[in-house]
Image (spheres, rainbow, N blue to C red):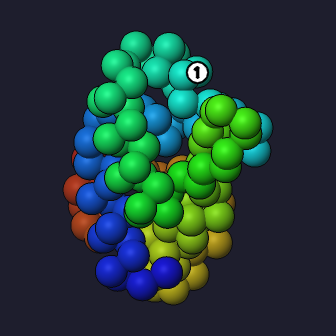
Amino acid sequence: MDNSTATTVFESLSSGVRLDIVRLLIKTGHQGLVAGEIATTLGLPATNLSFHLKALTQATLVSVTQEGRFQRYRANLAIMQELIVYLTEECCSGHPEQCFEKPLAAADCCDTNPSLSSTQTD
C-alpha cells in the first residue's frame, strides 16, 4: 500500500457513519449484508446510507454484488490487512514482530521516551 491509498482509506473512514458501516461489514465477514440490513441495523435512512456506501465503494473499502433486486455489500478485508501492514511495517525500527510480542503500550522497543514510560507505570 502506498501513502496515497492509505490517505484515501483514512479519508473515507473519517465519517462516523462510514466507520460504523465498515465495522458492521467486517463483523459479518464474507457473508456481508444487503443494503436494507445495513440501514436497519444502523438506523439509517436509505438515501443517507446510499451516499456513504457509494463513497466506501469508490475507496475500495467495500465491494458490492448484485443479487436479484438487492445489492450485497462486503468489507474489503484485504485492504484492511494491507492498511495494518502499512501502518506497522516500520514499527520498532522495521521489526514489527517485536512490537506485538506484548501490548504496544508496554513494548520496550517502541518507547520513544523511556523516562516517561517508567513514570506512567508507577
Q: Which residue is drawn at the image coordinates 56% and 65% (left, top)?
A: 79
| Horizontal side of residue 89 vs 101, given as left or right | left
| Horizontal side of residue 89 vs 117, given as left or right | right
Looking at the rendered structure, the secondary structure element under dot 1 is helix
Q: Which residue is drawn at the image coordinates 65% and 32% (left, top)?
A: 69
Tell me which corner region of the image, top left, top right, bottom left or bottom right, holds residue 28.
top right
Residue 100 visible at all:
no
Outermost residue, front direction? Answer: 69
Foreground residue among 39 and 16: 39
Q: Amino acid at mark 1?
A: Glu
Say above or below: 40 vs 16: above
* Residue annotated with mark 1: 37
Say above or below: 41 vs 115: above
Foreground residue among 20 and 69: 69
Image quadrant in which the C terminus is located: top left
| Horizontal side of residue 97 vs 85, given as left or right | right
Foreground residue among 77 and 57: 57
For label 1, count other residues whose C-alpha is less than 10 Å away and answer few (under 14), some (14-19) or many (20+): few
x and y, in percent, of residue 98 in the image: 60, 71
x and y, in percent, of residue 8 in the image: 33, 68
Residue 46 visible at all:
yes
Say above or below: 5 vs 65: below
Q: Which residue is drawn at the image coordinates 34% and 19% (left, top)?
A: 45
Tell me which corner region of the image, top left, top right, bottom left or bottom right, holds residue 80.
bottom right
x and y, in percent, of residue 73 in the image: 60, 42
x and y, in percent, of residue 91 in the image: 46, 75
Foreground residue among 5 and 39: 39
